[in-house]
Image (spheres, rainbow, N blue to C red):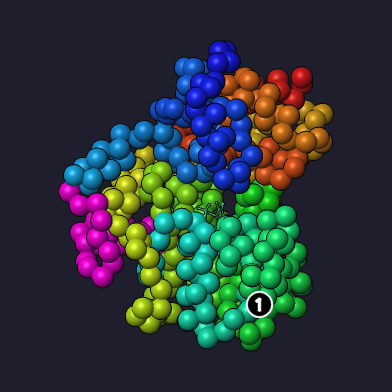
Amino acid sequence: MTDAINETITTIEDAHTSGAYPKRPLALVRGLGSTVWDDAGNSYIDATSGQGVALLGHSHPAVAEAIAHQAQTLITCPEIFYNDRRSELYTLLSDLTPGDLNRFFLCNSGAEAIEGALKIASLLTNRSGIVATMRGFHGRTLGALALTWNPKYREPFQSWTMDTVKHVPFNDLTAAQAAISENTAAVVVEVVQGEGGVYPIDFEYLRGLRSLCDEHGALLVIDEIQTGLGRTGRWFAFQHADILPDTIALGKGLAGGLPMGAVCWRESLGTIPASSHGSTFGGNPLACAAAIASLSALRDENLPERAAEIGTWLVEELRALNHPQVREVRGLGLIVGLELRGRVTPALKRLQERGVLALPAGLNVLRLLPPLIITRDELRRVIDAVRDSLDE
Ligand SMILES: *Cc1c(COP(=O)(O)O)cnc(C)c1O
């Protein structure tokens, strides 16, 4: 593998970047399917999907074509006007979401979807209490950050973040019962804690949360930003538990790589007052066109089903390695975590040297978040590279 990372790219980025990101010494310049290329022409299997975004892989022709076409038709159109692409996306989203999850607020990122979900919960319930979980991750803007557990992210801004958030241990129904009251506007959870270490929820616990919310008139808000749109083997991860939440937050892969987020809530809860929320770019036709193309491709190519099948196989194969460096393999569909006995950073570096890009989830969990279109052959190469880099 060629080592020559273009000096100019790194030098310029290092001179101007905020400093917010721990960087890997790798400049990616092209992607196709599950493969990405660096500036020296080396290829890598992208088991990060660009941080969970590229559900359809890179440069999916239908998405690229929809973006190009819409860019030449109408790029911008604020929600004070109606728009053909937006109405089409609403129809598609309401077909995909179960029950009466038919109201949407479109925005531009995952964190914005969580911010929206919080404001909407407050408007719909006239309450302010929020219950979130330990190890939960919901984004970095101040409202979303208040729900995010990791003290490293949250504590520097503690004085600015909402003091109405209570964090309870994940998968502990007794603790949730003690925290949820008549002041609770929303209970916010992930079905698989992604950034927190790839911890799947106990479905019995999720059903318990549903009952507690019903009992106290609180909204059950599911953060499906990482788990939604087929990643776990169902369109939405909460469907594994056979419940209907009041609100879901979407982001990441929603528009096939363009920035987009969405809050979806139950029609029976009503709408929010005019001017109580808004976004300049929210629901713009370019993102809507990309989302229509992405969701249609995910549906037409049966990718949620494929994620279930190939994800189960991946977990079985990783467990079968029986690797002494691996404490546990966890996952649901194509969100898979290997809890290592040591730190994950050196393992990620060795994987990269073997042509595989993966993510951390905390200090010692290696997270695989491949595109849903990844082939078994490609996953076999990932599995072999994982084995070899842990052997080293
Ligand atoms: C990525 C993520 C977010 C934040 O999304 P951004 O688009 O980075 O703001 C929130 N919740 C979960 C579960 C995520 O994985």
Q: Is residue 160 visible?
A: yes
Q: Is residue 88 visible?
A: no
Q: x and y percent of residue 301 in the render?
A: 37, 39
163 on left or right of 109 = right
Question: Residue 325 or 155: which is nearer the viewer?
Answer: 155
Q: Secondary structure at mark 1?
A: loop
Q: Which residues are magenta?
A: 73-98
Q: Would you say the beta carbon of the disc 1 residue lies within 8 angstroms of ligand 1?
A: no
Q: Residue furthest front?
A: 15
User: Which of the 4 image quadrants contains residue 143?
Assistant: bottom right
Task: Give the residue drawn at x 38%, y 57%.
Answer: 96
Query: Does residue 76 lie above or below 36 as drawn?
Result: below
Amino acid at circle 1: Thr
The crowd level at tag 1 (other Cα within 10 Å; few <14, some 14-19, many 20+) is few
Ligand 1 shows up in which quadrant of the image?
bottom right
Quadrant into which the N terminus falls: top right
> Is residue 51 within the magenta segment?
no
Quadrant into which the C terminus falls: top right
Task: Give the residue drawn at x 55%, y 41%.
Answer: 17
User: Which of the 4 image quadrants contains residue 168?
Assistant: bottom right
Question: Residue 297 or 17: which is nearer the viewer?
Answer: 17
